[in-house]
């Protein structure tokens, strides 16, 4: 696999860091979760619904294929273990509030002296040295600060809670890209790198398609009139007679022509060529009236052979139960019957190998510490006093 032989030390928690390092584990990296010796470890072990074996679904889908090291970093002996790990690691990931790693003596300056080839990635809400570095935040507050919640307005013009943790997701993907770039550069320079990865930066960077009003006209976007949020007739949701919803998801004129031809209303095509917003209201009204006249089943059959972008609103359960999701390998079942989200990166020659084993809290502590050269007596002593 692509990342065979790579050792990753992960001190992060919740979603951005753990999801990123799980992706690395799926592709062969040896990922060691360093969990606090507080009796719980990674917080998401105990968050959300659990399968009958007592494992939370969230934890199972960010921790698979990793090893767990319970470690008290406030104990000098625990810190010595971490420094020994860093000496042979390739990647180090942390997501504490800025300044914490320095107090713990596991900051980049300290660890890079031990291992100059280390790629060190710090994930935070607003960056390490910025004026808002100490502002506490999770996904939705970062999205709000980045202007994204304001975009999540319906036709009633009221903001709604975002249902996908986009700032978390963007941070995970951006961190993965940054780490892999740094590793690629290290092959040429033999030097490590420090990455200051801000969730705010990662989220606000994904706005090119909605930034026109702000950069071109100096005004805030009006979501209900924009192409991506309901202003376009061909990029919208329409209620059916049985209270389901058809989605039109492609505003190109060619798709409008195909759909209107199928509906025998080519006379309305000119509206699809106008800018999104009030100018397209007659076409939106036509679609609203038309789709409300029949059931979702009828429209699915009607649209099956129409060359346009369409879908329908369905639940997450329906999406994961769909055979297509299994066909793409995006849902997998382990030997115990637990389902896992599959790896999205599909290499032809070295595909991911999902290792659907969820580590127990501190399961690999003794094994890991012994591999660092600590004696059996030292390991026993560390375990006896709760350091590992």
Image (cartoon, helix red, strand yellow):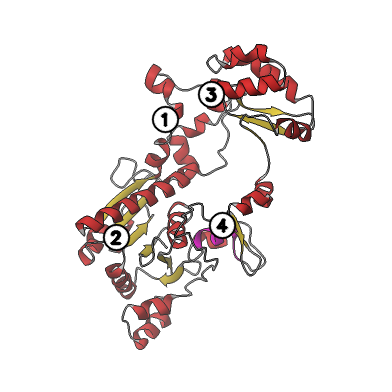
- Disc 4 or disc 1, which is closer to the eye? 1
Determine the CA span between mark 4 and mark 2. 30 Å
**Residue of label 4:** 58
Determine the CA span between mark 1 and mark 2. 39 Å
Classify 327 as above or below 206.
Answer: below
Over which residues does the magenta segment extend? 55-63
Magenta region includes residue 61: yes
In depth, the one of 353 and 128 nearer the eye is 353
- Disc 2 or disc 3, which is closer to the eye? 3
**Residue 99 locus on image (x, y percent):** 30, 54
- The quadrant of the image that shows the N terminus is bottom left
- Residue at x-position 41% and y-position 58%: 12
- Residue at x-position 21% and y-position 60%: 190
Q: Answer left or right for 367 relative to 265.
A: left
**Residue of label 3:** 227
Name the element at disc 2.
helix
Classify 351 as above or below 386.
Answer: above
């Amino acid at each position: 696999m692509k990342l065979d032989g790579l050792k990753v030390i992960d001190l992060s928690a919740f979603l951005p860091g753990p999801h990123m390092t799980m992706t690395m584990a799926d592709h062969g990296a040896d990922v060691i979760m360093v969990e606090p010796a507080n009796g719980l470890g990674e917080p998401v072990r105990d968050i959300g619904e659990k399968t009958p074996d007592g494992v939370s679904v969230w934890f199972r889908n960010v921790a698979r294929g990793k090893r767990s090291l319970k470690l008290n970093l406030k104990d000098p002996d625990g810190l010595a273990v971490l420094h020994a790990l860093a000496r042979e690691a390739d990647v180090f990931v942390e997501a504490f509030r800025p300044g914490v790693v320095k107090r713990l003596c596991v900051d980049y300056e300290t660890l890079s002296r031990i291992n100059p080839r280390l790629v060190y990635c710090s994930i935070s809400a607003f960056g390490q040295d910025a004026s808002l570095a100490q502002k506490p935040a999770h996904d939705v507050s970062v999205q709000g600060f980045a202007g994204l919640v304001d975009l999540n307005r319906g036709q009633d013009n009221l903001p709604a809670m975002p249902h996908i943790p986009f700032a978390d997701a963007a941070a995970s993907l951006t961190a993965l890209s940054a780490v892999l770039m740094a590793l690629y550069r290290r092959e040429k320079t033999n030097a490590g790198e420090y990455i200051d990865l801000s969730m705010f930066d990662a989220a606000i960077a994904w706005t090119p398609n909605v930034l026109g009003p702000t950069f071109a006209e100096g005004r805030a976007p009006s979501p209900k009139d924009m192409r991506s949020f309901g202003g376009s007739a061909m990029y919208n949701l329409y209620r059916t007679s049985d209270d389901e919803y058809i989605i039109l998801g492609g505003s190109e004129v060619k798709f409008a022509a195909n759909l209107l031809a199928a509906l025998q209303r080519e006379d309305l095509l000119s509206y699809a060529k106008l800018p999104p917003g009030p100018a397209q209201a007659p076409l939106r009204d036509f679609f609203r009236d038309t789709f409300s006249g029949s059931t979702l089943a009828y429209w699915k059959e009607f649209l099956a052979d129409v060359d346009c972008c369409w879908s329908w609103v369905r639940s997450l359960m329906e999406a994961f139960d769909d055979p297509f999701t299994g066909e793409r390998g995006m849902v997998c079942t382990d030997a115990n019957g637990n389902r896992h989200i599959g790896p999205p990166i599909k290499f032809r020659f070295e595909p991911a190998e999902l290792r659907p084993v969820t580590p127990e809290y501190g399961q690999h502590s003794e094994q890991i510490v012994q591999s660092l050269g600590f004696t059996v007596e030292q390991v026993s002593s560390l375990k006896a006093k709760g350091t590992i």
